[in-house]
Image (cartoon, helix red, strand yellow):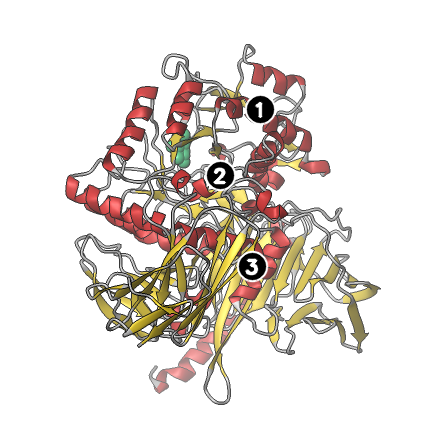
Amino acid sequence: MNERFRPERQRMNRRLLLPALAALFILFACAPVARAAWRAAGDVKTFVRQADGVVLVLTSGARVAVTFSDLETVRVRLAPAGKFERDFSYAVEPKDRKTVKANVTETRDTIKISSFNGASVVIRRRPFLVTVFDDAGRVVSEDDPARPASFDAETGAVETSKRRAEWEVYYGLGEKAGATHSRDTQQFVMWNTDTYAYPRGLDPIYQSIGFFIALRNERDAQGAAHAAAYGIFLDNTSRTYFDMGKTDPARLTFGAASGELNYYVFTGGRERTPKNVLRDYTDLTGRTPLPPVWALGNQQSRWAYSPESQVRAVARGFRESRVPADVIYLDIEYMDGYRIFTWDKTRFPDPVKLIADLRRDGFRVVVIIDPGVKADPNYSVYQDGQRLGHFVKTAEGRELNAKVWPGVCAFPDFTDAAARAWFGSLYQKNLDEGVAGFWNDMNEPGVFLDDKTPKPDIYHHPLKTFPLTARHAGDGQPGTHARYHNVFGMQMARSTFEGLKRLRPDARPFVLTRAGYAGIQRFSAIWTGDNVASWDHLRLSIPMLLNLGVSGVALIGSDVGGFSGNPTPELYTRWLQSAALTPFLRSHSEWGSNPHEPYSFPKEFTDINRASVELRYRLLPYLYTLFQEHTETGAPPMRPLWFEYPSDDRTYLIEDEYLVGRDLLVAPVVTESVVKRRVYFPKGDNWVDWWTGQTYEGGKDAEVDAPLARLPLYARAGAVIPTQPVVQHTGEMQHAPLTLVVVRGASGAGTLYEDVGDGYEYLRGSSRTLAATQEGDTLKLTRRGAYNVSRPLAAVEYLGLAAAPRAVRVAGRAAANATFDAATRRFNVPLPAENVEEISLVP
Ligand code: MIG
């Protein structure tokens, strides 16, 4: 700016000041009442101590509880109207929790609460502001003094803001089609919505999981990088929002349309690692129970395989083409007029026989069950639901009716325990017929617009769901649809899961849901809804799944090939390759689309597709072990690089690579016609090419070859990865001999977890683990557990050796039959039948 104009400008400013003030005054005086009703929560007036924290009364009349939910987790609960509701949450897993004793001290300006040896909180009194500290006394998260907690007494809306470092990034928030992998400087809303063919960036879509992990890198005096992570979970089932520094990079803001501002701050303990944060979040909201092993097999769906001859043809297609597969899905067309729990008698004359035949061939059948019950007075499910009073009612107390596939429907109130139990019991029929698992769709809930609906038919058309005034039981806290919309889908999946567990206590339920809320991982797998057959959607699927995984959901996947539209053979092949090691692997496509079976493309593609699925089946022992690990730690099987390498900030923005557990790095090609790509190898480990045995140094990029037939895949030096031979379905795993892939180049360890693959005997001791430790040239094997099955450890295979070693000793004796393959740098050592405990290379 030119200096000469300055004085002139200032004069003008002064001349404008008065009228501007007047205008501002008028503006405020006329502002809509709702906005004017926002007020700050105020100062602390009084407080009382509780065993686990304090309860404060603020000058606005609001009441706040600040407590420890565990040693490293702080809970803040603000009731604007001064009265707490009963303490109930759909997200929090019901279980016995120890009360964490809080030590409370006060000064004139502050109240401090600390947990013994854990986190602490300082509450400023004027105004009320919260600062959370970690075990070591470092600030984790602090209220923004410029925007203290506030609420709108008229609408019931609540909001708070936290200070934000401008280089802080965020992950999680469930299933989001966000523009980038990290959620910084973006804004999100939670409102479950059926968003057919959603484009990148559309928000919200199907799920509401208001939990995120914040991550930033700090340098100490010596210049060394230290990651500092923490997490926040807003537990409020009404419409909520998260502004991650978009409106103002100096703060992040979150709030809810009504209800309590009820949130948790996970400090991550002394290490402040993302792993600790997710462990604590999943300790609160639960973890995915070990799935039946068949649910980790390859799955095939389509809208729709019908009539039954087509289902049989698909099963035959897999077995004849030798593409392994475990599951076939039946979409809505199997039913009689879309009536749930029925069959179309012409298209599926004998479902019991069909399912039994498929089962003999190693296939399980999963059928779709929607929440809409056809309002047909001659239909028993409708009659029972009506008679028992299980359907959602309108504000006027009449049965709520809306159109979906079956025509006019009524909807069970899944927020009512009795309705959930009733609906859960209906699955008996399908179970008796042999159905193995269930797919709950349209449970946002989504309903159809009719001809009279005001257009355009936008993604978030308000009439695409129930009226906000509809009534729900809320498990003892009756409320409107506005309040319970976001848990409808989760509670449906819960009703399915709990029903299956009751009806078939010896089998692990498999449930797949489109909609959900925080804690959904306890009941169901999630797929990312109606994606599109485009390269951009393939690219998008990776950050979507990574963020969903660090939101606590383990069993996740996207429709391979894209639901809407038709992939080129190349796109399908790259998609299957990219997805081969994602937790839940299923191809699915919409009505009228071209065939999407992996074998339905020209031969050169089918061959590659087969190899992709074979890779998955070879690695199933490793994948299954990761699911067992998830039950103990909450770590997702599919992980972002930063999850394991939080101190390496090069990993933070990577969204086209992922880790499977700690030990496998996948760098798929997600761009058309590309046959080379750059791969970043996270710092601190070396990485060995799965196919060539070539070693790459961590902390560096490399350009690698990735012809269509090649998935760039790397194993961490030091790892020991359990594998098995290719099988056509998981039923063939029982006796398949195992091979441990021992990745050379560092000391390290690996585990194999095994059990019978279904049921609950594993909880009664019927499981075993094999721990393998590499120390220098020696591999030690330790076995634990009582599970007895003839699944021999047939070989160890060293990966990444430059040359064959001079000798190898198995249990002290020289092994004669080892072989070295120079092209793959793999050295295979067959093992004798008895349990070997030590294998040594003599280089
Ligand atoms: O209105 O059941 O996302 O996977 O194939 C569409 C038919 C209903 C939406 C699901 C999709 C499924 C389709 N459903």
Left or right of 717, for residue 120: right
Badge 3 element: helix
As drawn, the label of residue 633 is 3
Residue beneath label 2, please? 513
Q: Residue at 33%, 66% (x, y): give it.
A: 815
Residue 457 shows up from this direction: no
Residue 436, horizontal then vertical, whole percent: 48, 31
Q: Amino acid at mark 2?
A: Thr
- Pointer 1 or 2: first along the chain: 1
User: Mark 2 or mark 3, which is nearer the start of the sequence?
Assistant: 2
Labels 1 and 3: the sequence-earlier one: 1
Instruction: List x then y, in percent, for residue 49.
Output: 83, 65
Q: Nearer the viewer, mark 3 or mark 2?
A: 3
> How far from the left and from the top, in percent, is residue 734?
43, 43
Which quadrant, please, contains the N terminus?
A: bottom left
Which callout, 1 or 2, points to the residue nearer the camera?
1
